[in-house]
Image (spheres, rainbow, N blue to C red):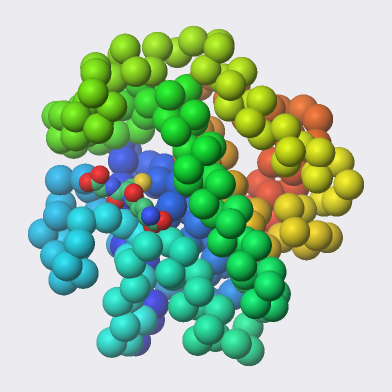
Amino acid sequence: MSIILYELQGKNDLRFSPYCWRSRMALLHKGLDAVFEPVLFSQKEKIEFSNQTLVPILCDASQIICDSWSIACYLDDNYKDYPTLFGDQKARSLTKQFNYWVDIIIHPLLAKAIMTDVFEYGVADQDKNYFRKSREKRFGMSLEKFSSRSQEDIKHLQNALKPLSAILRDQAFIAGNSPSYADYILFGSVKFALLTCPRVIFPRDGSIGEWVNRMTNYYSKNED
Ligand SMILES: N[C@@H](CCC(=O)N[C@@H](CS)C(=O)NCC(=O)O)C(=O)O
């Protein structure tokens, strides 16, 4: 039985979820084949079997794994003969810290920079009501007030990325000379912005821009 990855489906079958991209890249890195099963925001019944409401979800034989970090750990622990996503335990621990940094610091800044575009260009028409209602409840204001497409918001995000641009001046990838799970964590956020927002959000030049190009080439060279 093949591995199934349940992932978010947007407008015109756009797969824009940053967390689902992490799992997609992890499978690619391991060289594991998978079936990608699209799930709209409004199709909660499709993932009821997982006893929670978020994607990505990975199904492998009788195993059901929710949450992108747990999926990466599961793949590395259960497919040890395939290329490692982290390296050793110490590297895994540092990657977990990076995962928290992206989720806790970078994603709120990214959400502020692009959420109105995500709503307009990313979310499927039949999900728009659900998306607006749930996000406005979360942010405590209208989407347009929360994310007003201001240049300032992009500047705040790019400032927060400065430590990363420093390390990427010294080495090609976040954890060394070849891509690893740390790269996939942030690449998920980059794809999220590229797929849903027509404005430039992540730097197109400098060390981060060059890293984005490297990652994009890595993805297109390795996907089927
Ligand atoms: N911590 C989780 C976050 C997953 C998550 O937030 N997924 C979003 C898609 S980007 C989702 O499924 N949202 C469904 C909803 O809001 O109803 C992970 O890393 O996988």
Horizontal placement of 169 versus 84: left or right? right
Horizontal placement of 77 versus 8: left or right? right
Q: Position of residue 105 (x, y in %)?
A: 52, 38
Quarter location, residue 136: top left
**In the image, what residue occupies the spot 43% across and 24% down?**
112
Horizontal placement of 76 versus 183: left or right? left
Quarter location, residue 58: bottom left
Q: In the displayed structure, would residue 67 be above or below residue 17?
A: below
Q: In the displayed structure, would residue 207 be above or below residue 25?
A: above
Q: Position of residue 209 (x, y in %)?
A: 73, 34
Q: In the displayed structure, would residue 27 be above or below residue 110?
A: below
Q: Position of residue 149 (x, y in %)?
A: 45, 13
**In the image, what residue occupies the spot 19% across and 34% down?**
134
Horizontal placement of 16 versus 223: left or right? left
For the question of whether residue 4 can be seen, the reply is: no
Taking the view exactly as shown, the residue that stands out farthest to the right is 170
Numbered label tally:
0
**In the image, what residue occupies the spot 63% across and 57% down?**
182
**In the image, what residue occupies the spot 25% across and 32% down?**
138
